[in-house]
Image (spheres, helix red, strand yellow):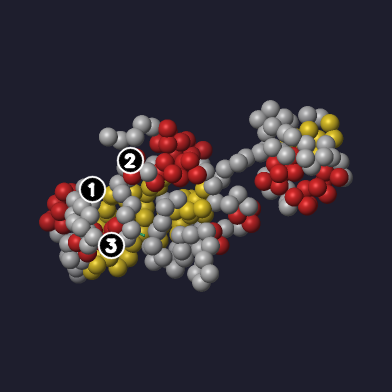
Amino acid sequence: MRLDKLLSNTGYGSRKEVRQILKKGMVRVNGSVAKDPALHVDPESDTISLLGEDVIYREFIYLMMHKPPGVLSATEDNRDRTVVDLLGSEERHFEPFPVGRLDKDTEGLLLLTNDGKLAHSLLSPKKEVPKTYFAKVAGRVTEEDTEAFSRGVILDDAYETKPGILNVLQSDEISEIELTITEGKFHQVKRMFEAVGKKVIYLKRLTMGPLVLDEDLKLGEYRELTEKELQALVKLDSSKQKG
Ligand code: URA
């Protein structure tokens, strides 16, 4: 990889700014001053330093966000704010994207990364990654609904869902539930409730595979995954597909 690209990707500025830094002799590669932006370096084996500080190269970023309502799970949009608009420039320069989609009005756990392979794996239907949602539902959610969900329900497009685990926390005029599903069809939770004649009025994702929403994150806040969370994801990525 070119030295200027590596430094720029690591957050030391634009390619133009990095070239200025190089010109001033502030960068050393394996102990020798390097001024050539096109110098080929290997981040694995070469030691690169800027004013004596080691440059730690990294390619990927993994962020957990508490998605607020009213924001799109997309990288850009002409009209609406997107989850990427909520990131600072330090994170944005890695060009992360949301892994899967939450509806505009849905809140909760959203993973953003630029690791396409991991994202693809998490979203693969074959992996059957469980996702748990908390919802408020208009009307009484009953044992029959729990049974229906455990068998799978037929959506408005005739698709039969895989079984879901419905846990009724409160059955009332406005019920509160937790639902765990292993698929990610468009509006799936809302449509599963429509299939049993009920309407979701509030939806929040709590978990995705091994990731659990960090309740210290306020709506719109985000943080990097911990090493433990990342390792759990990597393990899932490398695990054999179900079935
Ligand atoms: N199911 C939905 O209906 N909406 C979401 O945002 C996520 C799952």
Q: Position of residue 72 (x, y in %)?
A: 46, 64
Does dot 3 land on a helix, a strand or a loop?
Answer: helix
Decide which of 147, 72 is in the foreground and name it.
72
**Ligand 1 within 8 Å of the CB at mark 2:** no
**Ligand 1 within 8 Å of the CB at mark 3:** yes
- Tell me whether circle 2 and circle 1 mark residues in contact (CB < 8 Å): no
Does dot 1 land on a helix, a strand or a loop?
Answer: loop
Q: Mark 1 points at which residue?
A: 162
Q: Position of residue 212 (x, y in %)?
A: 40, 47
Q: Which amino acid does label 3 sit on?
A: Lys
Counting other residues with Cα less than 10 Å from the Cα at mark 3, is it few (<14), some (14-19), or many (20 or more)?
Answer: some
In this view, 17 is above or below 231:
below
Q: Which amino acid does label 1 sit on?
A: Lys
| Quadrant location of the C terminus in the rendered image | top left
110 on left or right of 141 = right
* For marks 3 and 2 on the same chain, the one whose residue lies earlier in the sequence: 2
Q: Mark 2 points at which residue?
A: 126
Does dot 2 land on a helix, a strand or a loop?
Answer: helix
> Can you tell which mark lies on residue 190?
3
